[in-house]
Amino acid sequence: MEEDILLLLLLEEEENLENRDRARYFRSLRDSTDPFALSESEFMKNFRLPRDICRSLIDDLRPHDQQKTSLPLTIRVLATLNFFGHGSYQKCVGNNCNLPMSQSSLSRSMRAVAKLIVKVKGEEIKFPSSTEEENIVRTGYVHTCVLKQLDSSKFTEFNFRFFTKYGIKSTIGAIDCTHVAIIAPASNNIERPLGLYLNRKGFYSINVEAVCDHRLCFTFLNAKFPGATHDSGIWATSDLREHLIRQHTNDSVGHRRQSWLIGDQGYPLEPWLLTPVGNPSTSQERKYNKLHCTARNCVERAFGVLKSRFRCLLKHRVLHYSHETSALIISSCVILHNIITKAGITMHAVDNEVEEDSDHVVNSGDCLQYTREGERIRARYISTL
């Protein structure tokens, strides 16, 4: 009996020693292992950002970091980037030999880092707001007096040149929606019923509205709506649409700014949003539709590149978070995508399902007036082709 007790005590002590040794090992690993010592290609593979851009990001976030934890900010940012990039389960990311941390620590860190990225780097998603910015986006031309006021980085940022690349004049962006899969919400949620998130593709999602430029950078993002919401329904209450309406109303008659977005037939035809001709009957209408389709395709490619870089947004990965946290992750990934794209780093897109909406868009009241004005603008533009 005494021998059995002694044996149990010895086994327990041996197990405690192993646990302490393992804990010391991971502490030393966390202190001594430097992910930045990886080759550039391996670093990019693991964290999606080049090392110099990643260091710069961490330096920019550091003054705003208020999370109370013993984990260094560098480890928390890298673990978050690894999760965004691979879409793996948090436990797998936490067990990464370069980033040893528990699942709960990773979960807290990911939310905190995502909030930091949106707070500090939110201006990376910027829609052209002034006349001069729109002119640069539409034509690539910058007046000398304006160029003197813009530093080189800002000039590069706004030098989109939709016209020179696609042949569509006055375009300031392409708009569309894409679905990002999330776990099924609670069935007893009164404010956001389960059915609102089941999209027409048959899975639960957030329907994300975005505008991009010809470089595949996103200039506007709206991740507020559940997957069952139609694209035109999202657009109807969009902050961007309200901005464009105010801009259109404030411009004096006869001096309207000739600039617009381009979208598919899931959107209403408006003076600031041109859609394809439903049944083209002339060579000019067919030419317009062809140019329109080529230019609008950039937003589909932008979604594909975004999801290729940050695979947590892929349909088959599924974000296991609430709508609010998922929207935060989406915004963070878009910001990081813009930073990488503006640095000139290209990436092949994954096959992104084209979210074509064939439902007829019904307009009434003021919307019908906008449609008629949009028809006149589109017809006038087509006549110049």
Image (cartoon, rainbow, N blue to C red):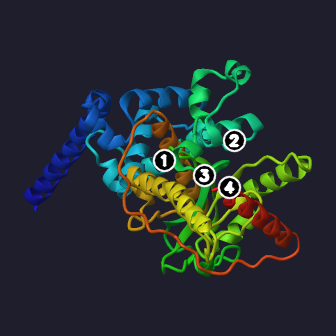
Tell me which amino acid carries mark 3: Ile
**Which structural element holds mark 4?**
loop
Alpha-carbon span between mark 1 and mark 2 = 30 Å
Tell me which amino acid carries mark 2: Pro
Q: How many marks?
A: 4
Q: Tell me: 322 left or right of 87.
A: right
Alpha-carbon span between mark 1 and mark 3 = 41 Å
Alpha-carbon span between mark 4 and mark 1 = 51 Å
Say which residue label 1 marks. Answer: 110
User: Residue 227: horizontal and vertical position, in percent?
Assistant: 58, 72
User: Residue 273: horizontal and vertical position, in percent?
Assistant: 70, 60
Indicate which label's residue lies in the foreground, 4 or 2: 4
Indicate which label's residue lies in the foreground, 1 or 3: 3
Is the residue marked by circle 4 packed among few (<14), some (14-19), or many (20+) residues within 10 Å?
A: few
Tell me which amino acid carries mark 1: Met
Frontmost residue, 341 versus 50: 341
Frontmost residue, 235 versus 332: 235
Kindly identify the residue that appears in the image at 72 percent across and 67 percent down.
269
Indicate which label's residue lies in the foreground, 1 or 2: 2
Kindly indicate whether the residue at mark 4 contacts the one at mark 3 (C-beta within 8 angstroms). no
Kindly identify the residue that appears in the image at 24 percent across and 45 percent down.
19
Q: Which mark is residue 347?
A: none
Tell me which amino acid carries mark 4: Thr
Frontmost residue, 50 versus 359: 359
Indicate which label's residue lies in the foreground, 4 or 1: 4
Say which residue label 2 marks. Answer: 128
